[in-house]
Structures are given as C-alpha cells and as structure tokens.
Amino acid sequence: MDKQEYKTIETYMLSCMTDAAHDPQHIYRVLYLALDIARFEQEVDLDILIAACLLHDIGRDEQFKDKGKDHAKVGAHMAYDYLTSIGWGEDRARHVADCVRAHRFRGKGQHQSMESTILYDADKLDATGALGIARTLIYQGQEDQPLYHVDGSHQLIYGEGDTRDSFFHEYLFKLRHVESRLNTTRARDIAAGRREAAENFAQALKNEVQDAHQQGALLLASALRKFD
C-alpha cells in the first residue's frame, strides 16, 4: 500500500467516525498496536491489515442510530463496497470485510486469518489499562449509564449482585477479562503491562465510593436523630 492509497482510505475512515469513545485516535491506536503485533507473527499481509484497522469501526454511527444493528456487520459491508469502489479486487476486499466482521467476536479461536486475529487483539488491547477505563467512562456517559448502583440502604452493590449497566459491572464482567481472550503472545504481553493501572483505578474508585456511602449513612442517621 503506497501513501496515496493509505490517505484515500484514511480520508474515508475519518468521514465515518463520530463516536467520542471510538474516535479517529482509537483507530490509529489500533493500527499502531496491530503493526506492533504483526512484527512477531509470520506471513502477515500488511495491506489487508492496515485497511482492516482503518475501516473496522466505520459502522459505529449506524449502530449508534439503531441499537439493533451490529457495527461490525454493517462495517464489513461498507468496507467491501468502499474498497471495490476504489479498485480493490473482490477477494482482497472480502478479506478486509471478514476481518472487520470478526473484530467484535467475544472469544478466541474464531478468526479465519492472521490479519483478523491481529485486528481483534489490537482492538481489544485498546480496552485494557488506563485507556480502557477512560474509554469506558466516555462511552457510558454517552449512554447515560451510572458509575455504580446502590441497594435500599444506599450502600454500593458490587460483584455478582451488580447486574445492571454501570462502570463497575463493565469492569468486573468485561474489562477484567479482556486479557484472557487475546490470541497473540505480543498482545498478552502488552495487556499484562497495563493490568495494574486498571486494577488500581477500579479498586481506588470502589474504596472511595464505599467510604463515602458508609460514612455518609452514619452521619445522616446521626443528623436526623437530632430532629426525632
């Protein structure tokens, strides 16, 4: 892929990105991580990989408008149509589309090519560490989801009892497990280096919330007794 073709695909990508949690910088980070991972793998088609990284989230706007749509499936169709429109052969355009379609898979071992595997790992890496925390908070703000929920006594619900959408639910049931779903050694090494930052933030937030609610409940009860 020469610079002109890269710029052409990049320009199309930029025209599609409207989601703050999946903005152009997310695309570039995924691309850069993918190129890093590719250095440690064999027989990677970098043209396919670069195009797939640039185009993997172009269906996000359609999903944002209609929650019933899967941005990966929408994006795969868009990527195929776009690449064939600029002269890519059907087989190579389909290969990119397959990578885009597969990047949302929740588990390992479901990828038909190394390019698809690398894109998946690179995209998931951007949900690890401090970046993963920050992007989750942005996304949940867009969706009007809270940081946490409380019980009838206004105490934090945490762990298995935290079943509704919230930051803690997302962290406990998704973010904490991203690392175990990665396929490549390089991606797992990067994720391991980011683990502590995410764990420290989540634990600090939990401690601050619990302290505020536990101490606050006691102070409120004391204050109200004065008026009994």
Image: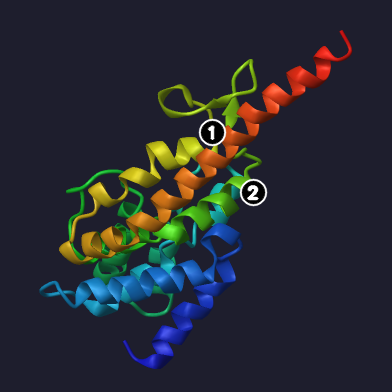
Find residue 125 and report its horizontal and vertical position in percent: 34, 60
Residue 93 in view of the camera: yes
Does label 1 or label 2 sit earlier along the sequence? 2
Q: Which mark is residue 142?
A: 2
Question: 69 or 21, which is in the foreground?
Answer: 21
Location of residue 212 (image quadrant)? top right
Mark 1 lies on residue = 165
Quadrant occupied by the N terminus: bottom left
Q: Is residue 138 above or below residue 203?
A: below
Residue at 31 percent across and 69 percent down: it is 93
Which residue occupies 39% across, 72% down? 83
Residue 78 percent across, percent down from the top left? 45, 61
Q: Residues within 10 Å of mark 2 (few under 14, many from 20)?
A: few
Residue in view at x 43 percent, y 51 percent: 200
The kind of residue tagged 2 is Gln
Whether 70 is drawn above or below 116: the answer is: above
